[in-house]
Image: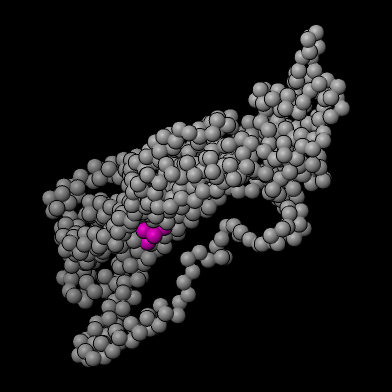
C-alpha cells in the first residue's frame, strides 16, 4: 500500500486524469440509467381469466372454474388461489409460494391449463394468463368527464380516439378503458311481423348466432312477447345488423331483421359508477413497456395528450382530467437526493474549512462527487434502475460518504503538524488509520448484507438498497485510499513555514514559536477543537478514576434510551405522507347502484 501511495503522489497528473475519467464515464452513464417508479419485480401473483359467453354464474362455476381448479391442484409452488365465477366470466387469482421458483411455477401453471381439454364448446378463446409484475403496473391515468349532464356514452368516441393516439407511442404497452359504457343493441322483435313472414324466434336467434353476434345470458329468458336483447359484437353500426338476412322464401324474397324488429343503439346498464371531481366520467389507465424510462415516458404521454386536446377539440361539457402520475413521487425523491447531495457537500465543505486548511478541506469534500460518480457507473452495469427503493439507499448512505476521507485527512494533517514532509505525511497518515477505515466500511456493508437474503417479492424489492450502499461506500473508500492521499501529498510544509518565520526574527524556532504559528496558520476551528480535546481529556481522567460514576452514567443513558423506545409511537405508513386515500363504505344488501350513488353524493 505504501508503494502504491508513493507512486500516485509522484504522478499527480495521472491522479487528476483518473478523477476526470471517472467523472466523464459517470456523465456518459447517466443516459443509460432507467428511471422507474418501483424495481422490476415479479409479484408472484397470477390471474387466469376465461370468457364463457352466455353462461350463468352457476354454469361458469360447474363447467369451467372447477375444471381449471382441479388442474391447478396438481401444481407445486402455489400458496393459495381464489376463484370467482360470474356471468360469462371465470376468474382465478393465484398467489405463489415466496420460496418457490416463480418462473418454473408459472410454466407449470400454463401446462396445467393447457391440459384441460374438455372445456365447453362456447369457450372459443383459451384462458388468458396474466402475470403481475411491477413493469405492468399503471403509471398514468387520465379521465374524461361530462359536466353538462350529457349521457356517459358520449365520452366513448373521444376515449377511443385518445386511446388509439396513446397506443401509437413506442413507450406505451397498454391502455385500458375503465368505466366506459359497454355498447348494446336492443332488438325489439315484432310478433305480428314475425307471424306474417312465418319466422320463429328460434330462427332469429340462429341467424344472429351464425353471424357471430353474442347473445347475453339473461335476455332469452326474459323474452315473453316482442323483446330480445342482443349484444353488439361484429357489427359496427345499427344499420349493419338491421340488414341481417333472417330468412328467404321460395321466390327469393329475403326478410331482413329491420323488417321484423326495431333496433335501438344504447349502452348496457352499469354495475359500477365512476365520478371524477363530482362529475360522471371514465378514465384510461396506461402502462409502459419494460425497460422504458418512466419519467421520459410520462413526459411523452402528457405531450401527446396536449396535442390531442388541440387536434380533437373536445365538445362543450367534456373535459380531460389528469388523475394519476406515478412519476411525481420518483421526481420528488430524485430532487431530495440532489438537494441532499448539494446541501451535504456545502455543509461538509463549511465544516472542513472550519477545522482543516483549504487544500485538505477541498480534497476531502471531493469524496462525495467521486463516490457518487462511481455509483453512477455501477448502477447501469448491474442493471439497477433509479426508483423509490434505490433512491432510499442513496439517501441513507449520503451521510456516510466522507467519514473515511475525514479520518484519513485528519491523520495526514496531524503528520503535517509534526513537521513531516507532505509525501511522508500522506503515506504515514494513511497507514496509521488504514485498518480502522477499512473495518469501518466493511462493518457498515455487513449491516446491509442481510437484505440480500430476504425471500419473495419483499427480497426482490429490497435487494437494490444494499447494492447502492455498497457502490457508494466502495467509491468513497477507493477515493479515500488512493486519490485523497495523492492530492494531500502536495500540501504545504507547516514546519518549514514556521522555521522560515523564526529565522526572519533572528532566532531558531522553539515550541512556543511552533504553537503560535499553528494558531495563526490553522483554521479558526482549531481553537475549538483544542478546547474540546482538553475538556474530553479532563472528563476521561475523571471517569477513569471514578469508575462507578462512569458505569452509572452509562446505565442512566441506557434507561433513558429504553424509555424513549417504549414511549415512541411506531407507524409504518404515516397518514400525513399518503399520496392517496381510499374511503370504503357499505350500503344495504338490497341497495342498487342508484341508491349507492345517492348515499355517496
Res 400 → quadrant:
bottom left
Relative to 425, is 109 on the left or the right? right
Count of number-bearing discs:
0
Relative to 342, is 226 on the left or the right? right
The one of 289 and 513 positioned closer to us in this rendering:
289
Percent coordinates x, y for residue 312 in the rendering: 73, 32
Res 200 → quadrant:
top right
Asked if one can make out residue 74 in the rendered structure from this viewpoint, the answer is yes
Percent coordinates x, y for residue 270 in the rendering: 71, 45
Asked if one can make out residue 345 in the rendered structure from this viewpoint, the answer is no
Relative to 74, is 554 on the left or the right? left
Percent coordinates x, y for residue 205 in the rendering: 71, 27
Residue 397 counted in the magenta span: yes
The one of 535 and 509 positioned closer to us in this rendering:
535
The one of 484 and 184 positioned closer to us in this rendering:
184
Residue in the image at 45% along x and 80% along y: 567
**Magenta stretch bounds:** 394-399
Residue in the image at 84% along x and 24% along y: 195
Amino acid at each position: 500500500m505504501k508503494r502504491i501511495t508513493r507512486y500516485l503522489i509522484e504522478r499527480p497528473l495521472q491522479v487528476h486524469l483518473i478523477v476526470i475519467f471517472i467523472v466523464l464515464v459517470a456523465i456518459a452513464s447517466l443516459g443509460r440509467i432507467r428511471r422507474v417508479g418501483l424495481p422490476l419485480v415479479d409479484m408472484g401473483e397470477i390471474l387466469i381469466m376465461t370468457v364463457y359467453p352466455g353462461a350463468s354464474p352457476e354454469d361458469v362455476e360447474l363447467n369451467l372454474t372447477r375444471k381449471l381448479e382441479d388442474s391447478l391442484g396438481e401444481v407445486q409452488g402455489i400458496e393459495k388461489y381464489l376463484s370467482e365465477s360470474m356471468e360469462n366470466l371465470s376468474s382465478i387469482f393465484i398467489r405463489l409460494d415466496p420460496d418457490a421458483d416463480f418462473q418454473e411455477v408459472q410454466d407449470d401453471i400454463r401446462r396445467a391449463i393447457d391440459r384441460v381439454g374438455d372445456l365447453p364448446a362456447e369457450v372459443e378463446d383459451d384462458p388468458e394468463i396474466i402475470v403481475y409484475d411491477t413493469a405492468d403496473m399503471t403509471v398514468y391515468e387520465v379521465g374524461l368527464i361530462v359536466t353538462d349532464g350529457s349521457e356517459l356514452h358520449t365520452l366513448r368516441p373521444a376515449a377511443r380516439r385518445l386511446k388509439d393516439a396513446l397506443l401509437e407511442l413506442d413507450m406505451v404497452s397498454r391502455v385500458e378503458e375503465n368505466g366506459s359504457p359497454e355498447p348494446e343493441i336492443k332488438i325489439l322483435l315484432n310478433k305480428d311481423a314475425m307471424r306474417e313472414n312465418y319466422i320463429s324466434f328460434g330462427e332469429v336467434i340462429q341467424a344472429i348466432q351464425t353471424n357471430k353476434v353474442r347473445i347475453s345470458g339473461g335476455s332469452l329468458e326474459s323474452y315473453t312477447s316482442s323483446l330480445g336483447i342482443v349484444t353488439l359484437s361484429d357489427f359496427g353500426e345499427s344499420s349493419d345488423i338491421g340488414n341481417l338476412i333472417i330468412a328467404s322464401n321460395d321466390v327469393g324474397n329475403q326478410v331482413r331483421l329491420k323488417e321484423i324488429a326495431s333496433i335501438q343503439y344504447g349502452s348496457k346498464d352499469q354495475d359500477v359508477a365512476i365520478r371524477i371531481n363530482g362529475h360522471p366520467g371514465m378514465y384510461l389507465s396506461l402502462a409502459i413497456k419494460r425497460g422504458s424510462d418512466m419519467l421520459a415516458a410520462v413526459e411523452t404521454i402528457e405531450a401527446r395528450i396536449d396535442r390531442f386536446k388541440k387536434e380533437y377539440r373536445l365538445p362543450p361539457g367534456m373535459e380531460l382530467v389528469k388523475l394519476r402520475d406515478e412519476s411525481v413521487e420518483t421526481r420528488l425523491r430524485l430532487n431530495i437526493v440532489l438537494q441532499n447531495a448539494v446541501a451535504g457537500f456545502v455543509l461538509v465543505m463549511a465544516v472542513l474549512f472550519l477545522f482543516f486548511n483549504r487544500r485538505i478541506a477541498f480534497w476531502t469534500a471531493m469524496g462525495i462527487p467521486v463516490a457518487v460518480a462511481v455509483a453512477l457507473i455501477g448502477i447501469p452495469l448491474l442493471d439497477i434502475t433509479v426508483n423509490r427503493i434505490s433512491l432510499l439507499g442513496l439517501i441513507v448512505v449520503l451521510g456516510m460518504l466522507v467519514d473515511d476521507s475525514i479520518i484519513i485527512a485528519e491523520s495526514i494533517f496531524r503528520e503535517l503538524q509534526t513537521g513531516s514532509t507532505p509525501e511522508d505525511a500522506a503515506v504515514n497518515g494513511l497507514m496509521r488509520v488504514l485498518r480502522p477505515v477499512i473495518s469501518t466500511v466493511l462493518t457498515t456493508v455487513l449491516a446491509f448484507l442481510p437484505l440480500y437474503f430476504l425471500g419473495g417479492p419483499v427480497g426482490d424489492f429490497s435487494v437494490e438498497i444494499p447494492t447502492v450502499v455498497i457502490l457508494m461506500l466502495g467509491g468513497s473508500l477507493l477515493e479515500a485510499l488512493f486519490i485523497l492521499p495523492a492530492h494531500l501529498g502536495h500540501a504545504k510544509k507547516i514546519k518549514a513555514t514556521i522555521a522560515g518565520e523564526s529565522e526572519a526574527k533572528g532566532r531558531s524556532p522553539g515550541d512556543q514559536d511552533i504553537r503560535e504559528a499553528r494558531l495563526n496558520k490553522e483554521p479558526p476551528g482549531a481553537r475549538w477543537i483544542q478546547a474540546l480535546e482538553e475538556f474530553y481529556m479532563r472528563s476521561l481522567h475523571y471517569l477513569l478514576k471514578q469508575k462507578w460514576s462512569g458505569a452509572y452514567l452509562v446505565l442512566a443513558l441506557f434507561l433513558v434510551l429504553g424509555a424513549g423506545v417504549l414511549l415512541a409511537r411506531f407507524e409504518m405508513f404515516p397518514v400525513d405522507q399518503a399520496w392517496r386515500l381510499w374511503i370504503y363504505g357499505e350500503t344495504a344488501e338490497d341497495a342498487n347502484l342508484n341508491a349507492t350513488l345517492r348515499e355517496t353524493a
